[in-house]
Amino acid sequence: MSGESAFEGVLRQIDDSVPFEPGYYNESYLDRRITARMRRRGTDSHREYERLLREESDEREALMDALTINVTEFFRNPEMWEVLRTVLTDLTDEKRRVRVWSAPCADGREAYSLAMLACDDPDIDESRVEVLGSDISEEALENARAGVYHTTRTTDIAEELAPLSEPDRHVERDDDAFRVRDAPRRLVEFGTHDLISDGSRGPFDVVLCRNLLIYIDTDHKGSLFDTLEASLAEGGVLVVGMTESVPPGRTDGYEPVDKRRRVFRRR
Ligand SMILES: C[S@@+](CC[C@H](N)C(=O)[O-])C[C@H]1O[C@@H](n2cnc3c(N)ncnc32)[C@H](O)[C@@H]1O
């Protein structure tokens, strides 16, 4: 296409043939993920990579995986979970039904962490807790629904579950495989949702939106935040990732519950 750089050609090809909207994400993020795939395919030419994407469905799938990096952990940033423990204790004291949204949930570990925490802590009434986990990646959601996680060379599931007082009550262990037990599983539902284009859900008492905002282009952060805000109940709690923040123009709408742990309450 005339006037188009080779990199833009790759982005157009993604737009045309991969279920991913490159325009939402910041360029440095897209560049890093695409370059990583090009290296794997042994090419440093964007034109050549554009051709590979056009012709090979396997490459389109591999790039989709690379673009929706599903890196996550149980109880990621454990200090934040101590704040959430208190939030959930208070909410289940006050309300009959406490709705929580893990958006995006990747392979489900954040959503199950919420459910396990509720089942584990005697001060939280888990019968009042409902968790929705959503993501745009179907593959991640399939893994989430399966609810089985493996310790590998780089991931120690037992260590990730350390914030629980009795992990064995919540997961069934078979060597390196950890299967989420029925009690926490019953509290969680999973579904597809695009945080930029699918609009609001809820209302939720707690919304976790962690480790996605950092990849989103400034122009689209606004619509993502509109979705989050419209999904929060009055006085609801919003949690963002440890390197993320509420956009400058919107901070008046929130009071910090714990600023350092990125937990805020909607005014
Ligand atoms: C790094 S993971 C974060 C998972 C979890 N919240 C955490 O902090 O561990 C980012 C997730 O965002 C998902 N994602 C990317 N764009 C999205 C969008 N527009 N709407 C919903 N989820 C999206 C990806 O598929 C990926 O699973």
Image: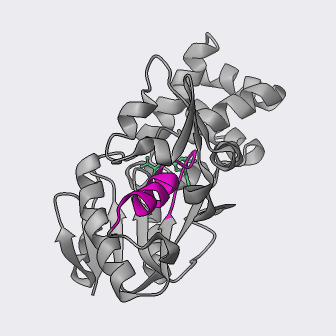
In which quadrant will I find the N terminus? top right
Rendering coords of residue 164 (x, y %) = 35, 48
Q: Is residue 104 magenta?
A: yes
Query: Which of the pair 89/206 is nearer the observer?
Result: 89
Q: Residue at x 42, y 63 (%)?
A: 118
Q: Residue at x 75, y 23 (%)?
A: 52
Query: Which of the pair 7/203 is nearer the observer?
Result: 203
In which quadrant will I find the C terminus? bottom left
Vertical comparison of 191 with 255: above or below: above
Q: Is residue 106 magenta?
A: yes
Query: Which of the pair 54/153 is nearer the observer?
Result: 153
Stretch of the chain drawn in magenta? 102-122
Question: In this rendering, would 254 be left or right of 111?
Answer: left
Q: Residue at x 68, y 29 (%)?
A: 62
Vertical comparison of 40 with 145: above or below: above
Rendering coords of residue 56 (x, y %) = 81, 25
Rendering coords of residue 239 (x, y %) = 34, 64
State how many labels appear.
0
Rendering coords of residue 211 (x, y %) = 40, 50
Question: In this rendering, would 162 be left or right of 18?
Answer: left
Is residue 227 visible in the rendered image? The answer is no
Vertical comparison of 90 with 174: above or below: below
Q: Residue at x 61, y 24 (%)?
A: 46
Snapshot quadrant of residue 235: bottom left
